[in-house]
């Protein structure tokens, strides 16, 4: 159970670090205030995704007593759908265009790592 929470917290930190790295290395940054607000929006989006994942896990496991394996798969699918939804609304956002595939890959690799650890 604690490994799922560690996974979710790791994804929260990874989203913040990923957004920061992408912003600092991005050739698209202009340095004006609107650009910084856009960057903060991306960090807020990835942080919100991870917090939804953590809250969803806590609710489903401790209140509804659903199996961890099912929760793990459902929350990952939910996060990926939320990313796609936000990506479809803001498809011209250059940071989101860069962050989305990297975040998909990052989540997939961490999912495979934790899948081995909790013996799904």
Image (tube, rainbow, N blue to C red):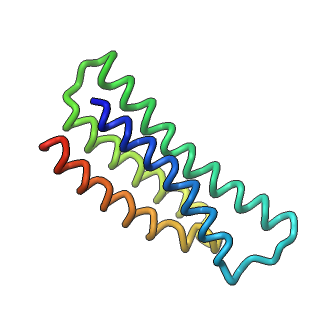
Q: Which residue is outermost to the left?
A: 119
* Nearer-the-camera pick, 68 or 91: 68
**Residue 98 to residue 46: above or below:** below
Give me the residue at 41% from left, 52% from top. Answer: 81
* Rendered position, 21 above or below 81: below
**x 40%, y 54%: residue:** 80
Where's residue 15, x and y in %?
52, 55
Quarter occupied by residue 59: top left
The C terminus - image quarter: top left
Residue 49 vertical position relative to residue 65 in the rendered view, above or below:
below
Residue 96: image location, x then y, percent:
58, 67
Quadrant of residue 35 within the rendered picture: bottom right
Residue 102 placed where, x, y %?
45, 69
Query: Going 71% across and 80% down the picture, which residue do you hit?
Result: 28
Judge from the rendering whether residue 82 lies leftward or rightward of residue 47; answer left or right.
Answer: left
Q: What residue occupies the far top of the structure in this picture?
A: 63
- Locate residue 33 relative to residue 110 in the image: left or right: right
In the rendered image, which quarter contains the N terminus?
A: top left
- When asked about the image quadrant of residue 53, the answer is top left
**On the picture, is 79 further left or further right than 20?**
left
Q: Residue furthest bottom?
A: 27
Question: Total of numbered circles in the picture?
Answer: 0
- Between 115 and 87, the one lying in front of the other is 115
Residue at the image point whose x is 83% and y is 73% from the top: 31
77 lies above or below 70: below
């Amino acid at each position: 159970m604690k490994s799922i929470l560690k996974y979710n917290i790791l994804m929260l930190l990874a989203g913040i670090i990923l957004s920061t790295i992408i912003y600092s290395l991005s050739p698209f940054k202009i340095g004006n205030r609107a650009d910084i607000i856009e960057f903060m929006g991306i960090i807020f989006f990835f942080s919100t995704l991870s917090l939804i994942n953590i809250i969803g896990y806590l609710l489903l496991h401790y209140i509804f007593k659903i199996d961890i394996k099912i929760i793990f798969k459902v929350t990952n699918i939910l996060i990926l759908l939320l990313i796609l939804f936000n990506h479809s609304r803001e498809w011209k956002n250059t940071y989101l265009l860069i962050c989305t595939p990297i975040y998909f890959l990052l989540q997939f690799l961490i999912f495979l790592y934790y899948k081995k650890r909790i013996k799904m």
